[in-house]
Image: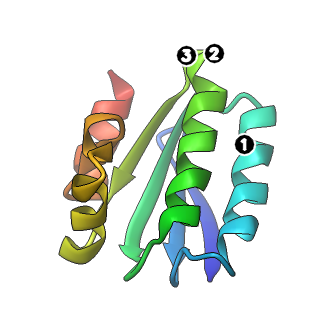
Amino acid sequence: MQITERTEETIPIISINGDIDLENSPKLRDFLKTKASQKTPRLLLDFAGVNYIDSSGLATLIEYFQSVQGSGGKLALASLSPRVKNVFEIVRLEQIFSLYPDIPAALAALKT
C-alpha cells in the first residue's frame, strides 16, 4: 500500500493505493495518528486506488474519526469503488463517514 499526500486549497488530500487490510492498516493507522496529533482540521482520503478494505481498515478509519471529532475535525472519503463502498454500506458506516463520488465534491463539502 502506498500513501501520498498533496494539498489543495489548504486541505490535505491523502491518496491511498492498495488494499487496506490487516497487513497494511498499521501503516495507515500511523499516518492518521500523525494527522490527528497535528490537529489537522480537515482531511480528504482519496480511495480511487483502493480495491479492498477489511475490518482492520475500517477500525483504523473509525479510530481516526473518533480522535478528531472532539476537536471539530472533518473527514471526507472520495472516489470509493462500488466494492469498497458496498463494505461501508453493509456495516452502515456510510451513516457515519461522509462519502463522495469524487475529489471535487469532497473538497466542496469540506469547505463548508
* Up/down of 41 relative to 30, above or below: above
Between the residue at mark 3 and the residue at mark 2, the CA separation in whole angstroms equals 4 Å
Q: Could you tell me which quadrant the C terminus lies in?
A: top left
> What residue does disc 2 label?
71
Compare marks 2 and 1 and give the one earlier in the sequence: 1
> What residue does disc 1 label?
35
Determine contact: label 3, label 2, CB under 8 Å.
yes
Instruction: Find numbered disc 3 in the image and state the secondary structure of the residue it sits on.
Output: loop
Q: Name the amino acid type tagged 3.
A: Gly
Horizontal side of residue 35 vs 88, given as left or right: right
Between the residue at mark 2 and the residue at mark 1, the CA separation in whole angstroms equals 13 Å
The residue at 41%/79% (across/down) is: 52
Q: Whole-percent x and y of residue 66?
A: 59, 30
Instruction: Find numbered disc 1 in the image and state the secondary structure of the residue it sits on.
Output: helix
Between the residue at mark 3 and the residue at mark 1, the CA separation in whole angstroms equals 14 Å
Q: Whole-percent x and y of residue 99?
A: 27, 48
The quadrant in which residue 29 appears is bottom right
How is colour applied across the structure in the image? rainbow
* Up/down of 90 relative to 72, above or below: below
The residue at 63%/15% (across/down) is: 71
Residue 89 disc label: none
Instruction: Find numbered disc 2 in the image and state the secondary structure of the residue it sits on.
Output: loop
Q: Name the amino acid type tagged 2.
A: Ser
Residue 6 vs residue 41, the one in the foreground: 41
* Up/down of 59 relative to 37, above or below: below
> What residue does disc 3 label?
72
Q: Could you tell me which quadrant the N terminus lies in?
A: bottom right
How crowded pointer 2 is (Cα within 10 Å; few <14, some 14-19, many 20+) is rated as: few
